[in-house]
Every structure is written in C-alpha cells, then in structure tokens.
Amino acid sequence: MPRPQPKSVPLPPQPAYLPEQRVAELASRLLRTLGVARALAESGRELDLRGIEDGVGQLCAQTLDLPTPEARCMVVRLREVLGQVDTLTEIFARTASASTAKPPARTRQVC
C-alpha cells in the first residue's frame, strides 16, 4: 500500500527589501560585528579582520549603486562605520605599542 504524501505547506512570503533597506541592514550588521571586534580587542584578544574589510567594501559599493538621494541618507551610517574602524585601529595601535614598550619578563630557571 503506497504511503500518503505529506501536504506541502507554503512558506510565508519574504519581505521585498528596497535597495536602501538592504544597504542599511548591511551597515547595521557591520556595525554589530565591529562592536564585537572592539570588545574582543579591548580585552586583549587577537582578531582576524579579513571579513570586515570585505564587508566595508561591499557596503561602499552598494551605497554607490544607490540613487543619489538614498545614498546621501547613508552618509551618517558610513561615518558610524568609519568611526568604529578608526576606534579599532587605535586599540590595535595602543596594544602594539604597549607590547613593544615592555621587554619580556625574564624567568629564572631552577635546577
């Protein structure tokens, strides 16, 4: 006897995002990622930031693709991203100068 086929349930329609909404969402995700990176950097953790560079590049490229009025609205978000990147750069600079300023502690070997 053949098994009855389950009825397929249609998925709810996905919202159609406008290009400026997609760019704003990309900026928000990037800002959250930069916030996490900042917290990790401030705690002295080593980070791999290769993905952030790609994210910033995508954000800039997609902003340039927007019509001029919508792109102008993104200036504030782009400045926020730049500020976060600058802060992260300063943290790395301080960490690097602090690690090179202190000579490594010598330990005494016990025989």
Image (tube, rainbow, N blue to C red):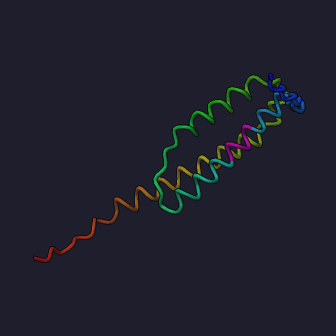
Image quadrant holding the C terminus, namely bottom left
Question: For this view, does 110 lie left or right of residue 63?
Answer: left
Q: Main secondary structure of the magenta part?
A: helix
Question: For this view, does 44 lie left or right of residue 67?
Answer: left
Q: Residue 110, percent across and down?
A: 14, 77
- Total residue callouts: 0
Question: For this view, does 11 lie left or right of residue 89?
Answer: right
The range drawn in magenta is 26-31
Res. 4 image quadrant: top right
Reply above or below: 38 against 61.
below
Residue lying at 62% horizontally and 31% vertically, measured from the top left: 57
Reply above or below: 107 against 96.
below
Image quadrant holding the N terminus, namely top right
Residue 48 vs residue 16, the one in the foreground: 16
Residue lying at 47% horizontally and 58% vertically, measured from the top left: 94
Residue lying at 59% horizontally and 58% vertically, measured from the top left: 39
Residue 49 on the magenta segment: no
Q: Residue 54, percent across and down?
A: 58, 33
Residue pushed farthest left?
A: 111
Q: Residue 42, percent across and down?
A: 53, 61
Reply above or below: 32 against 58.
below
Residue pushed farthest front?
A: 1
Residue lying at 62% horizontally and 48% vertically, measured from the top left: 34
Res. 13 image quadrant: top right
Q: Residue 26, percent across and down?
A: 72, 37
